Image (tube, rainbow, N blue to C red):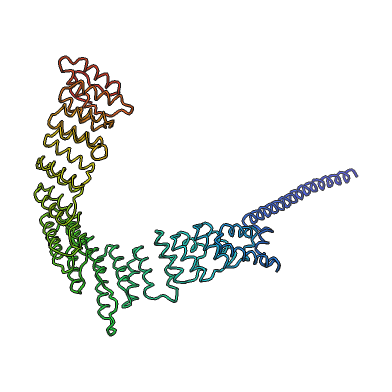
């Protein structure tokens, strides 16, 4: 019995242990399931938050009302808006732009501007353009775009033509950015936009709009000029040639010249010449139209463009080939042609070719233009071809036409050229020609002649020319005074120079500058007239003309050479003690100090000079030093 009881107890203990294990296992699985459930809910919540963040916000009630206002307002409200629009139009007719705009903004704030017609927007925009309120123009256009308004063709034509005529090119480009494809493919609209991009300096944007321009159905040949202008700006030679071939015999001279310019700017002159020859063939193959003469495709500008390309490439032989071709086609070279050819000859230093160009110019039956001839004379003088320049000048005198006669610039260039070659006699001969032709010399010509007198040291002639021309009414300039001072200094007439500066302001109305006083001193010092140089310095100080670094350096060197240590000390003292100290080279001061130390009985001067240098923080060389650091 006891055994049975014991067995039953053992079985009960076994069941209890198993039950406990089962309970723990069930608790574990239940916890695991609960944990997974909570994790899934949290994950779902986070996903919803992310979707909420990235999803567009729901429109506010105000926005919904504004968007659907056109539908929501009743007939009475629409009638009120209509009356307001009529009132604004009347204000605009009366040039009351500001009042009309402020009235408009009261409707714009709550979205009621969506009910206004294109007529009101157009009138507001046109008025804003007239008064220069381009910011208002852009704001109104953005309102129309936001409201879904599709402006008419006439609206865009009027607005863009007004903006273009007033050079508001950036606004034109902003219109294209805002409306894009919704703009009509109209040649007027896109010509304004493309021209605006070109004028605004953004040719790439102009090129990007060309396909819309070409979508217009009413393009005629002359409208292709805008295409070619754009291709010139972006340097697209291939596209320009494509238009060239598309137009064929319908091409005009302007279009051809744009094609040639595109090639030349791309540094492809041979390609330009090929297109020129093709154009000549097209022109020759056009059928005659009775007595009517068709406008030529090839003109002088066409050849000038190609010549310019060869000139830039330094291909002189090809330039003359073009010249012979154009003359063979009965096209007379003009001023641009000759100017380009001469520039090329001078650039490559081909004086033989330059002679050929000048000879061709002089043999022309047409009048020789004064400006062109003067440019030629300048170029020949610059290239040291004065005899050829004189030959051209004589040809100009021989011609009787008004447009061929030498002018004051021509005479001035030749006078200076003769003076620079020290041929004063020929310079005076040109002056006689000028007076005979009825031209009065000016201060520039007087200055050139005085320079010539200085070169040959003819003081008497210089004084006579100066006095005679001033008596004839020539008004001297700063340069005239400087040249006279140089002439006096070169010839040792220092008293004349001194009195000229002293009396200059009272005689001619303007005060000599520090440059004139420095020139006066320099002339005196050149002949070792140290006392006269010092008198010039005292005159400058008495007239309250501030000396500069050049003045003091020039005078100080002279006074050191004269061993006048009192004046040296006065110059250095002024330089270091004036409110804005004037720099003097350390080497110059130490040179003076070395010399004054070596001079007998000048110990005090040496000490004073050294003290001035130390006061100015200028390095002082040791007494026995031979070299500067």
Q: Against 475, is 516 above or below?
A: above
What percent of the width, then of the height, locates residue 354? Answer: 14, 60
Question: Residue extending furthest right?
Answer: 1
Q: Against 30, is 566 above or below?
A: above
User: Looking at this view, is 141 or 542 the one in front?
Assistant: 542
Counting the numbered discs, the total is 0
Of the 4 image quadrants, the one containing the C terminus is top left
What percent of the width, then of the height, locates residue 124? Answer: 55, 62
Q: Would residue 271 be visible to someone looking at this image? A: no
Question: Residue extending furthest bottom?
Answer: 290
User: Looking at this view, is 430 or 330 the one in front?
Assistant: 430
- Left or right side of 451 for 180: right
Q: Against 496, is 208 above or below?
A: below
What percent of the width, then of the height, locates residue 550? Answer: 23, 33
**Residue 96, picture quadrant:** bottom right
- Left or right side of 542 for 401: left
Q: Would residue 132 be visible to someone looking at this image? A: yes
Of the 4 image quadrants, the one containing the N terminus is top right
What percent of the width, then of the height, locates residue 51? Answer: 64, 56
**Residue 575, picture quadrant:** top left
Question: Residue extending furthest front?
Answer: 471
- Left or right side of 329 for 199: right
Residue at x 26% of width, y 71% of height: 299
User: Looking at this view, is 563 or 33 the one in front?
Assistant: 563
């Amino acid at each position: 019995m006891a055994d049975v009881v014991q067995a039953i107890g053992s079985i009960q203990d076994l069941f209890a242990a198993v039950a406990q294990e089962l309970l723990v296992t069930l608790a574990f699985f239940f916890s695991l399931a609960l944990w997974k459930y909570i994790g899934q809910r949290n994950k779902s919540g986070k996903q919803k938050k992310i979707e909420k963040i990235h999803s567009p916000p729901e429109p506010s009630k105000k926005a919904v009302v504004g968007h659907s206002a056109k539908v929501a307002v009743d007939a009475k409200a629409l009638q009120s808006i209509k009356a307001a629009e009529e009132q604004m139009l009347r204000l605009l007719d009366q040039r009351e732009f500001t009042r009309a705009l402020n009235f408009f903004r009261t409707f714009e704030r709550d979205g009621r501007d969506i009910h206004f017609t294109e007529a009101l927007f157009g009138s507001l925009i046109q008025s804003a353009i007239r008064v220069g309120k381009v910011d208002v123009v852009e704001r109104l256009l953005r309102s129309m775009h936001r409201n879904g308004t599709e402006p008419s063709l006439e609206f865009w034509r009027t607005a863009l033509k007004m903006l273009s005529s007033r050079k508001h090119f950036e606004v034109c480009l902003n219109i294209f950015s805002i409306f894009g494809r919704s703009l009509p493919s109209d040649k007027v609209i896109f010509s304004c936009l493309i021209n605006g991009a070109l004028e605004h300096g953004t040719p790439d944007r102009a090129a990007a709009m060309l396909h819309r321009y070409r979508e217009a159905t009413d393009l005629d040949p002359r409208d292709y000029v805008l295409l070619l202008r754009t291709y010139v700006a972006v340097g697209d030679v291939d596209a320009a040639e494509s238009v060239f071939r598309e137009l064929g015999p319908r091409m005009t001279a302007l279009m051809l010249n744009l094609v040639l310019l595109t090639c030349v700017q791309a540094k492809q002159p041979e390609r330009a010449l090929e297109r020129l020859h093709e154009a000549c063939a097209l022109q020759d193959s056009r059928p005659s139209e009775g007595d009517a003469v068709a406008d030529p495709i090839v003109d002088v500008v066409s050849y000038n463009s190609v010549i310019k390309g060869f000139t830039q490439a330094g291909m002189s032989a090809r330039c003359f080939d073009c010249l012979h071709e154009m003359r063979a086609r009965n096209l007379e070279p003009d001023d641009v042609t000759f100017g380009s050819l001469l520039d090329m000859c001078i650039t490559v230093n081909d004086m033989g070719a330059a002679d050929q160009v000048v000879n061709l110019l002089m043999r022309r039956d047409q009048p020789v233009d004064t400006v062109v001839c003067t440019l030629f004379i300048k170029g020949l003088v610059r290239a040291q071809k004065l005899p050829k320049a004189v030959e051209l000048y004589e040809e100009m005198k021989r011609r009787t036409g008004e447009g061929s006669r030498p002018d004051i610039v021509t005479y001035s260039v030749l006078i200076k050229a003769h003076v620079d070659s020290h041929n004063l006699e020929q310079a005076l001969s040109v002056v006689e020609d000028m007076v005979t032709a009825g031209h009065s010399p000016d201060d520039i010509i007087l200055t050139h002649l005085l320079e010539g007198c200085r070169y040959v040291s003819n003081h008497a002639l210089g004084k006579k020319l100066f006095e005679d021309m001033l008596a004839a009414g020539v008004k001297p300039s700063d340069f005239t005074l400087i040249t006279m001072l140089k002439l006096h200094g070169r010839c040792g007439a220092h008293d004349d120079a001194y009195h000229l500066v002293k009396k200059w302001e009272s005689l001619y109305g303007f005060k000599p500058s520090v440059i004139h006083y420095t020139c006066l001193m320099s002339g005196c010092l050149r002949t070792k007239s140290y006392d006269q140089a010092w008198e010039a310095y005292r005159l400058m100080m008495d007239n309250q003309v501030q000396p500069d670094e050049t003045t003091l350096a020039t005078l100080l060197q002279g006074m050191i050479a004269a061993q006048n240590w009192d004046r040296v000390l006065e110059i250095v003292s002024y330089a270091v003690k004036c409110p804005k100290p004037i720099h003097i080279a350390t080497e110059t001061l130490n040179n003076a100090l070395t010399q004054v130390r070596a001079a007998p009985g000048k110990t005090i001067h040496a000490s004073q000079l050294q003290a001035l240098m130390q006061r100015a923080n200028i390095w002082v060389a040791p007494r026995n030093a031979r070299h500067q650091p």
